[in-house]
Image (tube, rainbow, N blue to C red):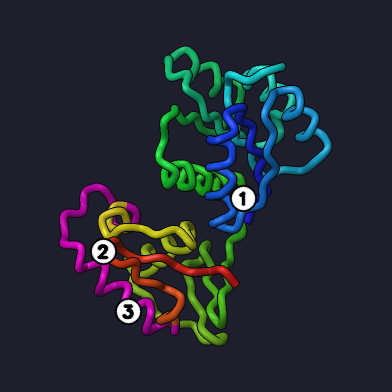
Amino acid sequence: MAHILIVEDDRDINDLIARNLKLVSHTYRQVFDGITAAATAEKEDFDLVLLDVMLPGLDGFEVIQKISATPTIFITAKDGLSDRLTGLSLGADDYIVKPFEMLELLARIEAVLRRTKKNNAAFNLDSVTVDMTTRTVKVKGREIDLSPKEFDLLEVLIRNQNIALSREKLLELAWGYDYFGETRTVDNHIQKLRSKLGWEERIKTVYKLGYRLEVKR
């Protein structure tokens, strides 16, 4: 997974982001002002920076000019078009306006990490190896067949490991916004994944909600 610098002066938001990064197995460093952010990025290698704009010391637009070699996502309350254009023109890979959904932030992080090749292409758990690049799955070294939607659902579970996802959210993430099927479609695909991967105890049913891939080792 990735090593991420969180630059946010609101301690509650900073802590919330950190907790969710930890859930999906990223490592992180938390800082709360622009000067410390620039100094930390200079001393330590990061795969991604999550950067607020309105910061003490140096603002986010000043910070990104000092760390331009590191992929960056702005997370800010500044929602004006001119602010977005400024952030993107300075080299930001994405621009997210507060308030935001944590699952959206995690999805945006994964998208940037994939584009910048800063994320692991392989996922290993128990006797299962999942190659995200080739979309292949092996169990005990033997390749098994998954349908395209089974793999899409598996990837969503892996990207959001340890997070409880509703059936509706899984439909949205794995099937897309234009899918109007019933939520039992998710249940059927989950049962197939459990059987094929031997993950009966890994893919947990969350009562009255949906499912969670449990990766706490």
Q: Position of residue 169 (x, y in %)?
A: 31, 53
Q: Amino acid at mark 2?
A: Lys
Local SS, label 3:
helix
Q: Identity of the amino acid at label 1?
A: Lys
Residue located 64% across and 41% down the image? 48
Q: Would residue 11 appear left or right of 207 to someone viewing this image? A: right
Residue type at mark 3: give it.
Answer: Lys
Magenta run includes residue 12: no
Residue 198 occupies quadrant: bottom left
- Tag 2's secondary structure? loop
Residue nearest the viewer, comparing 55 with 120 = 55
Nearest to the eye among marks 1 and 2: give it.
2
Q: Are marks 2 and 3 in contact (CB under 8 Å)?
A: no
Residue 87 versus residue 6: which sits nearer the camera?
6
* Disc number for residue 184: none
Q: Residues within 10 Å of mark 3 (few under 14, many from 20)?
A: some
Ranked by sequence position, the earlier of labels 2 and 3 is 3
Tell me which secondary structure the magenta stretch mostly adopts.
helix
What is the CA distance from the residue labelled 3 to the residue labelled 1?
A: 30 Å
Q: Earlier in the sequence, mark 3 or mark 1?
A: 1
* Marker disc for residue 208: 2
Whole-percent x, y for residue 99 in the image:
41, 30
Residue indicated by mark 1: 117
Give, as a single range, the part of the protein colored magenta: 173-198
